[in-house]
Image (cartoon, rainbow, N blue to C red):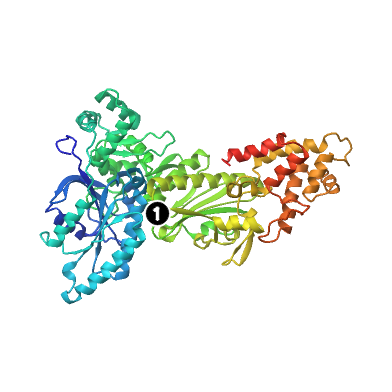
């Protein structure tokens, strides 16, 4: 942005663990698009972590490439939870830096991790901007390769880059040219080529004129001493600057200012959707940095020690000098960096990103009384997908908030898990390698199945919601956890699971799915919450079995049908003739129904249950019923056919069934 006149300046994001990361910046910077220097990393040493956390912002100029806003993002793991707050990836060039002296397998793994991380962060922006970000591969350490070995090294590195292109070329604009550089030689011709490549990702833009007026006014807004605004308040301030700018113009201008590093717009996690506008980025970076600084980071005079809970005085000691501490704590809650809990009469704070203890496997040991078990697994679809390291800490904060809203407090929390125990026991667990999340619930009584399902749905919603914020480009698959594993295994890493498609295919056959590792067949009805889970109905629609009828629909339908069974009858040993004929088509005779009168609170519930049981028992694997079968298959299609034949198409019972499907969008 030239004198705030509207010229577009691109962003350069820098994430580092190694000193040579800044060597490349120094070399390029002998000096309008956005460039991200995105480095793969290993576990950092104390020296490598000596730079501060947070995000340092500066304007730089790269020769032959242009002017950039430099975002120097800290690379230590504790800070990952904040990256999605700052990163915007429209029209971006990423420079991926690895070490040419590493083993070839390590180099390939490093590129795959980097590319999957980029894809996870940027896909939403790609969809919005209709453009792919550019990726340039750079290897450092050219000076460490012997001349006689250089041709072999170049061939091997080119092959690694080619395979990476084949995997990720669908999602990213990966340049064919790759570089092996000596960062000590900024004038080298290869460094000039790299600068030229930066311009290949160039996409000239001009920011809205409103941006200049907002920036001029921002200095006045900062005098409040707390440079944070909710979107509504910010929008009102903008209206004072320009007469009635429309909402779209405000959003476009705000996004441009975010990309310029002048402000940060953080989307809200609350239902009201009121975004947060940060007017002073360095201020925001300093307070977040001081909160999340690892113990080996030296720029801050005080850091939080790594422990499970922090008192108000712990936080105040670290944040002393930053305006109102209570306002800051509220901000950290909104950003999902921490949550509060009660320890006796004192309020304590938990910062999931600083937890360093993994869940003991004794936390989910077999329990003879808790035999009602259900679970789901959300895993990365393939090698191009990954979960952001910042995903699980934010998910833990989100879950704890919702648990409290459900009047269920957290029983315990670890780096890779969170658990509650309140009538039903629930565990949310991140597997090793951060490739899958397990959601497990168990209870003692069948009457708690609804509570189990509600818990599963709450966690599932939060999982998808947080993934959409922290790694929107990650594709995930849903699997169903084995109930047998949940009852008998203590280590969540060993839980068996079934792909959702296998569940649906098995339901179409004999209602059982076989797990080879467990060497055991399980009934689908024991894996999904019958009466509440609509998975089968949504997939098979009217061809699904009547046992999957949702509980509220079953209650209304049974009440109407039970009236029909008695219509016109007085004696206990009699039943309505139409009801009798209907039951006969289900393979159930009058005498059986009369016998149920003495033990069933609802004849219709017994009728549907027995119809489903008998059909499942007799249904041959993979076979379809023939037209001459006297017993109808227990599907909703046939139930409606029977009802319309024995009663009428507009009968209230027909309306009840069809309404259930309409409510499910079918």
Image: 324 above or below 422: above
Q: Quadrant of residue 312?
A: top left
Is any atom of residue 405 visible in this view?
yes
Query: Judging from the image, what secondary structure is the residue with disc 1 in?
Result: loop
Q: Residues within 10 Å of mark 1 (few under 14, many from 20)?
A: many
Dot 1 corresponds to which residue?
387
Question: Going 58% across and 42% down the picture, which residue do you hit?
Answer: 666
Q: Give whichever of 435, 226 is nearer the camera.
A: 435
Task: Name the side, left or right, on which 62 lies relative to 559.
Answer: left
x and y percent of residue 406 in the render?
53, 39
x and y percent of residue 47 in the render? 22, 60
Rendered position, 243 above or below 26: above
Query: How far from the left and from the top, in percent, is residue 567?
Result: 82, 34
- Residue at 19 percent across and 73 percent down: it is 150
Q: Quadrant of the N terminus?
A: top left
Question: Which residue is the extreme one toward the bottom?
Answer: 148
Q: Quadrant of residue 431?
A: bottom left
The reply, left or right, for residue 424 in relation to residue 304 is right
Q: Residue furthest left?
A: 187
Q: 192 or 146: which is nearer to us?
A: 192
Q: Observer-nearest residue: 143 or 617? A: 617
Q: Position of residue 129 (x, y in %)?
A: 32, 44
Image position of 649 (left or right of 460): right
Image check: 496 left or right of 589?
left
Q: Nearer the viewer, residue 252 or 597?
A: 252
Check the image and report above or below for 641 versus 75: above
Would residue 13 be seen by someone viewing this image from the given angle? no
Q: Quadrant of residue 222?
A: top left
């Amino acid at each position: 942005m030239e004198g705030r006149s509207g010229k577009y300046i691109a962003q350069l994001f820098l994430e580092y663990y190694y000193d040579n990361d800044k060597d490349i910046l120094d070399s390029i910077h002998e000096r309008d698009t956005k460039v991200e220097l995105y480095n793969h990393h290993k576990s950092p040493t104390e020296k490598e972590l000596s730079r501060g956390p947070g995000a340092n912002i500066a304007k730089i100029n790269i020769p032959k490439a242009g002017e950039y806003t430099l975002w120097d993002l800290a690379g230590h793991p504790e800070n990952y939870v904040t990256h999605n707050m700052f990163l915007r990836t429209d029209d971006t060039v990423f420079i991926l830096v690895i070490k040419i002296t590493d083993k070839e397998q390590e180099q390939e793994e490093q590129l795959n991790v980097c590319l999957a991380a980029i894809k996870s962060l940027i896909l939403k922006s790609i969809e919005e901007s209709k453009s792919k970000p550019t990726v340039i591969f750079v290897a450092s350490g050219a000076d460490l390769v012997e001349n006689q070995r250089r041709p072999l090294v170049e061939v091997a590195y080119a092959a690694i880059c080619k395979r990476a292109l084949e995997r990720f070329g669908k999602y990213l604009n990966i340049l064919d040219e790759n570089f092996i550089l000596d960062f000590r030689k900024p004038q080298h011709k290869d460094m000039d080529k790299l600068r030229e490549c930066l311009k290949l990702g160039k996409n000239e833009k001009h920011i809205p004129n409103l941006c200049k007026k907002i920036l001029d006014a921002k200095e006045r807004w900062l005098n409040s001493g707390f440079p944070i605004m909710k979107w509504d308040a910010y929008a009102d301030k903008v209206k004072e600057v320009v007469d009635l700018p429309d909402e779209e113009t405000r959003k476009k201008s705000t996004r441009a200012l975010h990309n310029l590093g002048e402000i940060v717009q953080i989307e809200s996690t609350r239902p009201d959707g009121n975004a947060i506008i940060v007017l002073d980025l360095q201020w925001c970076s300093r307070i977040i940095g001081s909160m999340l600084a690892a113990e080996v980071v030296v720029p801050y005079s005080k850091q939080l020690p790594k422990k499970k809970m922090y008192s108000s005085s712990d936080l105040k000691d670290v944040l002393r000098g930053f305006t109102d501490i209570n306002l800051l704590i509220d901000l950290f809650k909104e950003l999902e960096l921490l949550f509060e809990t009660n320890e006796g009469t004192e309020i304590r704070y938990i910062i999931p990103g600083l937890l360093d203890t993994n869940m003991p496997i004794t936390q989910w040991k077999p329990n003879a009384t808790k035999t009602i078990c259900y679970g789901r697994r959300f895993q990365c679809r393939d090698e191009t997908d990954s979960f952001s390291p910042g995903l699980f800490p934010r998910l833990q904060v989100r879950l704890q908030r919702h648990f409290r809203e459900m009047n269920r407090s957290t029983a315990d929390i670890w780096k890779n898990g969170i658990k509650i125990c309140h009538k039903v026991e629930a565990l949310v667990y991140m597997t090793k390698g951060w490739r899958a999340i397990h959601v497990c619930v168990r209870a003692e009584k069948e009457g708690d199945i609804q509570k189990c399902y509600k818990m599963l749905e709450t966690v599932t919603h939060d999982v998808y919601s947080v993934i959409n914020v922290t790694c929107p480009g990650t594709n995930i698959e849903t699997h169903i956890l084995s109930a047998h594993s949940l009852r008998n295994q203590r280590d969540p890493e060993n839980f068996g699971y079934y792909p959702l498609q296998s569940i649906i295919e098995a339901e179409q056959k004999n209602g059982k799915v076989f797990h080879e590792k467990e060497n055991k067949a399980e009934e689908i009805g024991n894996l999904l919450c019958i009466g509440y889970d609509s998975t089968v109905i949504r997939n098979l629609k009217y061809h699904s079995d009547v046992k999957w009828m949702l509980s509220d629909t079953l209650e209304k339908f049974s009440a109407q049908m039970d009236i029909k069974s008695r219509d016109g009858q007085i004696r206990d040993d009699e039943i309505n003739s139409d009801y009798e004929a209907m039951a006969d088509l289900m393979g159930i005779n009058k005498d059986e129904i009369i016998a149920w009168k003495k033990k069933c609170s609802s004849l219709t519930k017994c009728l549907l249950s027995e119809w489903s049981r008998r059909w499942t028992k007799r249904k041959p694997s993979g076979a379809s019923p023939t037209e001459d079968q006297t017993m109808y298959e227990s599907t909703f299609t046939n139930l409606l056919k029977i009802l319309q034949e024995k009663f009428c198409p507009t009968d209230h019972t027909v309306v009840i069934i069809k309404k259930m499907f309409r409510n499910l969008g079918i």
